[in-house]
Image (cartoon, rainbow, N blue to C red):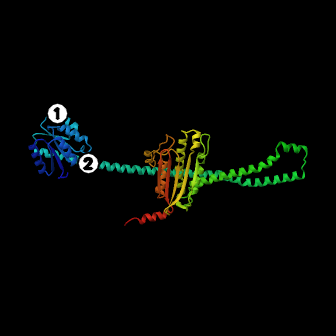
């Protein structure tokens, strides 16, 4: 307990004020006085006392009403109040305690008893304040521990998701690549063989323009002229199809890059294109809505040092959220309204201050309300229905960009106009670390 604490004494009797002031001053306290309730309230708000000795019977507002007003104010509500009264009725004391008083002193009072009661209540107050500080500190520690736990959970979830995706890609590559390559390579031979047979057939028709009736009838029945033209077109289409499958498998490999456990210099645009390829089924036109256009505004970027697989995971989460927003908007519009204002995603890249690159992903969807924008990077926060979202996608993306790549991820959104996510990461991770260390003072 501090010996210089301020005690406010409220009494309308000058003799009582003099005696109380002298006793408290002798005990080492600073003393302020007030002769009525109104003055006591103003005095307490101007210079907060550590404790108030409050007379019950006073002109104007009595001690009970004064106590009620002091406890109703956020400024003075925590100040302990000891009533001083000649009243001995139990109901009066109960009324005072119900209003928030901590103790009673009955007049005429003993000086020693007064000082002991004052010191006791100040000790109780100091103990409560210390306890509140300890609880607040412990709460902060637990909050930090919870955040660290959530962060660790997110890292585990991300690692498991990426590991699962890597296994899936490896399986797809093994099961699809070999037969597709076999078909694709053999189509080259089939095209040559077919062209040889067609050349032979044309040579035969040249030297034997008038075949027997049975051959002529069979040629007309099978539309031999059409078959000669269409067989080459069919083989060409099959080659395009197998090439497309090869490109999709390659996109999956580029997207996951599970074999890369260190920073590697990669082409960011390849990662974005691979991600778009994987999401293509959600972008194409359906009977319910036209195609969602993806506009690429790529700058001339150097190779970027990054964890390519993790960075592509962030692109995936942001692009998938943009598509979700456009689909939600389209669900409340007619096909004609969608045609008049089609969904669009613009991806732009550029160099910032010669040391970082910026990737902006913008959509013309419904936008995000301001109160939600403040929480979109929080772990486990989602506005989607149960079973539709885990609330981890954007939090994982934020962690990948800021913690894994020493970058920034920001969201800019205007309700009714759209949303833009802006990513900035260093071009060279080692250079970024060196710059950070150079700013430290020793």
Report whether 141 appears left or right of 348: left
Choose between 272 and 182: the one closer to the eye. Answer: 272
Is there CB contact under 8 Å for labels 2 and 1? no
Asked which quadrant contains residue 214, the reply is: top right
**Percent position of residue 10, x then y:** 15, 43
Question: Tag 1's secondary structure?
Answer: helix
Asked which quadrant contains residue 221, the reply is: top right
Question: Which label sits on residue 90?
Answer: 1
Question: Which label sits on residue 396?
Answer: none
Q: Residue furthest toward the front?
A: 340
Q: CA distance from mark 2 to mark 1?
A: 30 Å
| Image point (17%, 47%), residue name | 7
Q: Residues within 10 Å of mark 2 (few under 14, many from 20)?
A: few
Report whether 249 appears left or right of 77: right
Q: Is residue 107 visible?
A: yes
Q: Is residue 262 visible?
A: no
Asked which quadrant contains residue 269, the reply is: bottom right
**Percent position of residue 356, x then y:** 50, 61
Q: Is residue 418 above or below residue 305?
A: above
Choose between 65 and 30: the one closer to the eye. Answer: 65
Question: Tag 2's secondary structure?
Answer: helix
| Image point (65%, 53%), residue name | 246
Q: Residues within 10 Å of mark 1 (few under 14, many from 20)?
A: few
Report whether 428 appears left or right of 48: right
Choose between 135 and 89: the one closer to the eye. Answer: 89
Classify the position of the C terminus by image quarter. bottom left
Q: Considering only order in the chain, which callout, 1 or 2, is on the residue closer to the N terminus? A: 1
| Image point (50%, 47%), residue name | 418
Residue at numbered disc 2: 129
**Percent position of residue 336, x then y:** 59, 40
């Amino acid at each position: 307990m501090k010996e210089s604490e301020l005690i406010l004494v409220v009494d309308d009797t000058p003799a009582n004020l003099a005696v109380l002031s002298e006793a408290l001053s002798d005990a080492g306290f600073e003393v302020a006085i007030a002769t009525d309730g109104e003055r006591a309230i103003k005095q307490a708000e101007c210079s907060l006392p550590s404790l108030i000795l409050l007379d019950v019977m006073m002109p104007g507002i009595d001690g009970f009403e004064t106590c009620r007003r002091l406890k109703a104010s956020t400024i003075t509500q925590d100040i302990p109040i000891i009533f001083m009264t000649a009243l001995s009725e139990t109901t009066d004391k109960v009324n005072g305690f119900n209003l928030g008083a901590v103790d009673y002193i009955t007049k005429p009072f003993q000086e020693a008893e007064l000082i002991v009661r004052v010191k006791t209540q100040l000790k109780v107050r100091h103990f409560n304040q210390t306890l509140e500080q300890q609880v607040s500190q412990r709460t902060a520690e637990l909050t930090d521990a919870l955040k660290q736990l959530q962060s660790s959970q997110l890292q585990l979830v991300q690692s498991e998701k990426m590991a699962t995706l890597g296994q899936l890609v490896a399986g797809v590559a093994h099961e699809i690549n070999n037969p597709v390559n076999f078909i694709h390579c053999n189509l080259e031979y089939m095209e040559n063989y077919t062209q040889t047979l067609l050349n032979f057939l044309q040579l035969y028709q040249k030297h034997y323009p008038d075949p027997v009736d049975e051959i002529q009838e069979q040629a007309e029945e099978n539309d031999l002229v059409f078959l000669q033209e269409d067989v080459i077109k069919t083989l060409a289409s099959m080659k395009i199809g197998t090439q497309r499958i090869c490109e999709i498998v390659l996109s999956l490999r580029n997207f996951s890059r599970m074999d890369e456990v260190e920073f590697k210099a990669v082409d960011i645009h390849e990662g974005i294109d691979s991600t778009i390829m994987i999401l293509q089924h959600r972008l194409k036109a359906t009977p319910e809505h036209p195609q969602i256009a993806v506009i690429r505004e790529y700058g001339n970027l150097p190779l970027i040092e990054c964890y390519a697989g993790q960075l592509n995971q962030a692109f995936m989460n942001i692009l998938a959220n943009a598509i979700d927003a456009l689909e939600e908007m389209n669900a409340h519009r007619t096909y004609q309204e969608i045609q008049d204002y089609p969904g669009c995603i613009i991806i732009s890249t550029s160099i910032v201050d010669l040391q970082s690159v910026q990737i902006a992903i913008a959509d013309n969807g419904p936008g995000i309300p301001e109160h939600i924008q403040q929480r979109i990077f929080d772990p486990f926060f989602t506005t989607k229905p149960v079973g539709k979202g885990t609330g981890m996608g954007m939090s994982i993306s934020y962690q990948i960009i800021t913690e894994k790549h020493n970058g920034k991820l920001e969201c800019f959104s205007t309700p009714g106009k759209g949303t833009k996510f802006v990513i900035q990461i260093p071009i060279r991770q080692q250079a970024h670390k060196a710059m950070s260390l150079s700013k430290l003072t020793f």
